[in-house]
Image: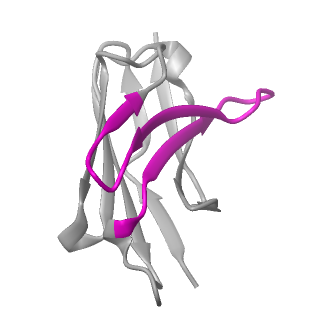
């Protein structure tokens, strides 16, 4: 069974940076490198929104709200996806979730203070 574990969240001041990681494990017939990886986030009382996606071919896609500030990457040798978040804003405060083929991690809290 595929499992995803996010890490790297924390408290940061506006304008600061954080780097989130998503470690994937439990693959059987399909390997990590064959899947697209995505990051979503969910602020209190709001729905879970798309943040960034990286395909198996390393194409990247971003929500307009994070474009130019966030960078998604992957390391297939480590079965890991990363989200580098720069120039953070209070509106970025949310629980950030990793997603692979509709499998979700437990989330990691990101809080940006003003």
Question: Residue 44 lies in magenta, yes or no?
Answer: yes
Query: Which portion, as a residue range, is magenta?
Result: 34-61
Residue at position x 31%, y 68% in the image: 33
Where 10 sits versus 65, above or below?
below
Residue occupying the point 41% across, 56% down: 7
Q: Position of residue 64 (x, y in %)?
A: 47, 14
**Outermost top residue:** 114
**Residue 72 point in image, percent of width and height:** 31, 39
Say above or below: 102 vs 59.
Answer: below
Where does the N terminus fall, quadrant-wise? bottom right
Q: In this view, which residue lies farthest toward the front?
A: 57
Q: Please, is residue 89 above or below residue 53 in the view?
A: above
| Residue beneath the point at 37% across and 27% down | 12
Report if residue 72 lies within the magenta region.
no
Q: How many numbered circles does the render carry?
A: 0
Q: Judge left or right: residue 16 versus residue 41.
A: left
Q: Nearer the viewer, residue 30 or 98?
A: 30
Give the image's coloring scheme.
one colour
109 vs 111: above or below: below
């Amino acid at each position: 069974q595929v499992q995803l574990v996010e890490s790297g969240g924390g408290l940061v001041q506006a304008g600061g940076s954080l780097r989130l990681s998503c470690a994937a494990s439990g693959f059987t017939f399909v390997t990590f490198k064959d899947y697209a990886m995505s990051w979503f986030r969910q602020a209190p009382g709001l729905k879970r929104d798309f943040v960034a996606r990286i395909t198996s071919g390393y194409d990247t896609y971003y929500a307009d709200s994070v474009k130019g500030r966030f960078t998604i990457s992957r390391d297939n040798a480590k079965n890991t996806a990363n989200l580098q978040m720069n120039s953070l804003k209070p509106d970025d405060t949310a629980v950030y979730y990793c997603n692979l083929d509709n499998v979700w991690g437990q989330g990691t809290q990101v809080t940006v203070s003003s």
